[in-house]
């Protein structure tokens, strides 16, 4: 049973930084592509970033390119968030894609394991 647990969220001023972490337990983490998504109040959950299982490929939503960086190690995936804006306020989720094909990393349908989320609030 694969489980994902996010941490690192909190309250930060606009322009500040946060580093989110997602710890994986169970399963074969090294074989999963990983993604970060977020959901703001009253909005649908949206893609933020993804990283392939071998860390060779990364993808980002246009809204976070140049500000966010996704990375991973043997058991965790990270999201470094810099130059935060009020519009980055959301609950952030990590998710695992166990299909094996890094075809459409922004599509939620390919992720079958999700964490519980961590709140990020950016004050302006």
Image (cartoon, rainbow, N blue to C red):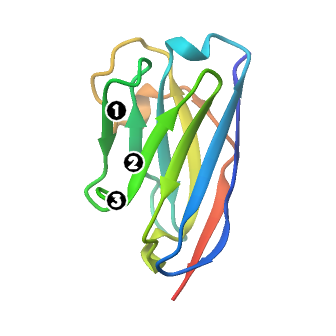
Secondary structure category for the residue under label 3:
loop
Q: Say which residue label 2 marks.
A: 47
Which residue appears at 32% of the width and 47% of the height? 60
Q: Say which residue label 3 marks.
A: 64
On the image, the x and y values in percent for residue 49 come to 40, 44
Sequence order check, earlier mark of 1 and 2: 2
Which residue appears at 44% of the width and 19% of the height? 53
- How far apart are labels 3 and 2 at the CA level? 10 Å
Q: Say which residue label 1 marks.
A: 105
On the image, the x and y values in percent for residue 77 come to 57, 35
Sequence order check, earlier mark of 1 and 3: 3
On the image, the x and y values in percent for residue 102 come to 32, 21
Kindly indicate whether the residue at mark 2 contacts the one at mark 1 (C-beta within 8 angstroms): yes
Horizontally, residue 23 falls left or right of residue 114, namely right
On the image, the x and y values in percent for residue 63 come to 30, 62
- How far apart are labels 1 and 2 at the CA level? 8 Å
Q: Nearer the viewer, mark 3 or mark 2?
A: 3
């Amino acid at each position: 049973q694969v489980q994902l647990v996010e941490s690192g969220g909190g309250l930060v001023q606009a322009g500040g930084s946060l580093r989110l972490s997602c710890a994986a337990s169970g399963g074969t983490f090294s074989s999963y592509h990983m993604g970060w998504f977020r959901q703001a109040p009253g909005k649908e959950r949206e893609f933020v970033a993804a990283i392939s299982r071998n860390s060779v490929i990364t993808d980002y939503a246009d809204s976070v390119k140049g500000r966010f960086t996704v990375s991973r190690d043997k058991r965790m995936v990270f999201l470094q968030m810099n130059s935060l804006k009020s519009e980055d306020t959301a609950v952030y989720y990590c998710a695992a894609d166990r299909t094996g094909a890094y075809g459409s990393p922004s599509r939620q349908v390919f992720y079958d394991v999700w964490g519980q989320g961590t709140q990020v609030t950016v004050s302006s």
